[in-house]
């Protein structure tokens, strides 16, 4: 008997989360983290069934979960299990630390984008204005959309280099 | 899409550029490919940051192309200035500083703050100013009358014979000199004359003393003749003049007063000079020019000098002789008025 589509999606998500967390945490901690993510999706977001909804949400939860684990380990000097109540969900009411990090990231991005070439700058401007790749292709006069994909990929790599290899603050 | 092409969609995940189809393809690939999944996780911070509209606006501003924006007018102090202008201005400043520092100090000429107006100066004669000293007043040889007996009328009945003789002698002498002045001092260039006005002797009305008048003011005169060289030389008043001689009369008083000079002519007296006289200052009559021979013989002048101004008309017709013209006495108030000095001067030009 096969799994339901949602259960199948969650199983695949768990596998990806465990592998991601295991590359950064201990195996047990990675397993626990993945389990907590799935529990949260199951308990609070049980109404979501599409991949386009579950994947971004799971990515966000994993990210915040990883932050919480790192903060707690930094405070206690150890890695411990994080209760489900400690998982910070996307919340408009940021903590001061979140706000500072957010502002710092924006400023670093602004400085890095200012150093991009003319084409990358224009491409980034069009993306931030909400244009799709198809619209950008027409505006910039590219022959195919793959050309725009390639340009954007290169520009993203260049921007990441200017940011120090990581969107977050380089450690 | 192949794996490489799917990875190229990562750049549109964080910015929300992907279409629903692209998103579905990317997520499906992430679900199957661990690298794509982790790449999406790496994009999470950027996606979260770009969700904020304020952050998007800030990044758009950073991406704004300066060439697309109209150039704002730049303040003048930010504009580029040609190096030559800067060098010229610096050289001008240095030059001005050197000039101001090392230029010789010039002292300005003194400025007369108060305007000096020329004070009125007494008119000075062109004639020689050195005059012989005045003869002492009263030193002239005036015949002294003997003490006369108290008679109501001189020469009247009952007058002693010696008195009659003296009177006759004085009258004869006075008649021989004519109506001229009573000359004081020795015969020479400078003569002092002083005479008391006889009642009725003048055609005008001098201030006549009524009782115990003060002594008349002293006045001396000199007749000067023009020499061929142009210089003026004094001559004796009794010396006959040549027909071509040019003369002037110079007066000098010891005290201040008023000088009136009248010339006698056929139809009367004509005033030719009036001077307010300062002491020890020479006044020449006429002021300009000279007297010369008019062919009518001697020219006679009557001179009056008084301490107070007198009422002397410009012309007195019909008065030929000074005798027999009773002059009205001026009303007297307070102290008696001073007695004026009268002179009779004759320039003895020959008749043609």
Image (cartoon, helix red, strand yellow):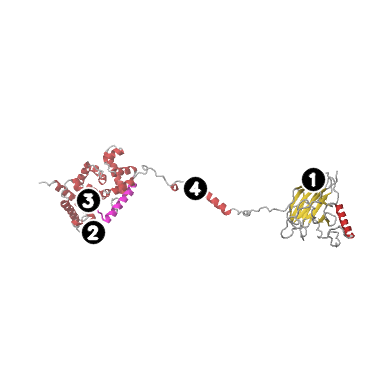
Mark with earlier residue (3, 2): 3
Residue A110 inside the magenta-drawn segment: yes
Proximity of marks 4 and 3: CB atoms separated by less than 8 Å: no
Front of the two marks 2 and 4: 4
Which residue is disc 4 drawn over? Answer: B86
Which residue is disc 2 drawn over? Answer: A73
Question: Same subunit under labels 4 and 1?
Answer: yes
| Relative side of B97 to A73, left or right | right
Chain to which mark 3 belongs:
A
Image coords of residue B26 (percent x, y)? 22, 44
Give the number of the disc on residue A79: none
Q: Nearer the viewer, residue B23 or B295?
A: B295
Disc 1 to disc 3, C-alpha distance: 149 Å
Disc 4 to disc 1, C-alpha distance: 98 Å
Residue B32 visible somewhere in the drawing: no
Badge 1 marks a residue whose secondary structure is loop
Badge 4 marks a residue whose secondary structure is helix
Q: Is residue A81 above or below residue B90?
A: below
Which residue is disc 1 drawn over? Answer: B267
Residue A56 visible somewhere in the drawing: yes
Question: Same subunit under labels 2 and 1?
Answer: no
Q: How many marks?
A: 4
Q: Nearer the viewer, residue B155 or A135?
A: B155
Disc 2 to disc 1, C-alpha distance: 153 Å
Image coords of residue A154 (percent x, y)? 29, 44
- Position of the N terminus of chain B, as image quadrant, is top left
Q: Residues within 10 Å of mark 2 (few under 14, many from 20)?
A: some
| Relative side of A53 to B270, left or right | left
> Could you say which quadrant of the image residue A66 lies in?
bottom left
Front of the two marks 2 and 1: 1
Give the number of the disc on residue A60: 3
Front of the two marks 3 and 2: 3
């Amino acid at each position: 008997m096969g799994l339901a589509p949602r259960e199948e999606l969650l199983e695949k998500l768990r596998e990806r989360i465990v592998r991601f967390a295991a590359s950064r945490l201990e195996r047990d901690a990675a397993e626990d983290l993945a389990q907590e993510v799935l529990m949260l999706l199951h308990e609070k977001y049980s109404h979501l069934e599409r991949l386009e909804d579950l994947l971004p949400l799971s990515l966000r939860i994993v990210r915040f979960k990883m932050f919480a684990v790192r903060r707690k380990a930094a405070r206690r000097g150890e890695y411990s299990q994080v209760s489900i109540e400690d998982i910070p969900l996307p919340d408009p009411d940021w903590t001061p630390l979140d706000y500072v990090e957010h502002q710092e990231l924006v400023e670093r991005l602004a400085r890095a984008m200012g150093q991009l070439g003319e084409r990358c700058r224009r491409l980034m401007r069009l993306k931030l204005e909400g244009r799709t790749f198809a619209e950008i292709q027409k505006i910039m006069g590219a022959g195919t959309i793959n050309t725009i994909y390639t340009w954007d990929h290169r520009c993203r790599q260049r921007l990441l280099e200017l940011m120090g290899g990581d969107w977050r603050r380089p450690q | 899409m192949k794996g490489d092409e799917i990875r190229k969609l990562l750049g549109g995940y964080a910015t929300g550029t992907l279409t629903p189809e692209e998103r579905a393809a990317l997520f499906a690939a992430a679900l199957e490919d661990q690298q794509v999944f982790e790449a999406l996780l790496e994009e999470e911070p950027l996606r979260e940051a770009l969700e904020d509209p304020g952050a998007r606006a800030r990044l758009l501003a950073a991406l704004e192309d300066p060439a697309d924006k109209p150039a704002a007018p730049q303040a003048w102090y930010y504009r580029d200035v040609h190096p030559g202008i800067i060098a010229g201005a610096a050289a001008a400043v240095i030059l001005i500083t050197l000039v101001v520092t090392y230029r010789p100090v010039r002292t300005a000429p003194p400025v007369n703050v108060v305007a000096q107006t020329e004070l009125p100066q007494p008119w000075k004669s062109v004639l020689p100013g050195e005059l012989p000293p005045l003869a002492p007043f009263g030193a002239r040889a005036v015949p002294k009358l003997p003490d006369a007996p108290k008679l109501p009328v001189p020469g009247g009945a009952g007058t002693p014979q010696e008195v009659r003789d003296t009177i006759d002698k004085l009258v004869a002498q006075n008649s021989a000199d004519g109506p001229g002045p009573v000359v004081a001092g020795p015969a020479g260039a400078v003569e002092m004359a002083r005479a008391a006005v006889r009642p009725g002797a003048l055609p005008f009305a001098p201030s006549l003393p009524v009782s115990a008048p003060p002594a008349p003011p002293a006045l001396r005169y000199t007749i000067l003749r023009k020499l061929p060289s142009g210089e003026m030389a004094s001559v004796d008043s009794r010396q006959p003049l040549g027909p071509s001689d040019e003369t002037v009369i110079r007066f000098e008083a010891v005290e201040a007063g008023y000088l009136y000079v009248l010339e006698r002519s056929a139809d009367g007296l004509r005033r030719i000079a009036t001077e307010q006289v300062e002491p020890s200052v020479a006044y020449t009559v006429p002021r300009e020019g000279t007297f010369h021979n008019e062919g009518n013989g001697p020219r006679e002048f009557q001179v009056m000098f008084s301490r107070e101004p007198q009422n002397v008309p410009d012309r007195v017709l019909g008065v030929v002789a000074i005798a027999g013209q009773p002059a009205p006495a001026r009303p007297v108030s307070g102290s008696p008025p001073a007695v004026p000095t009268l002179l009779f001067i004759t320039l003895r030009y020959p008749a043609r």
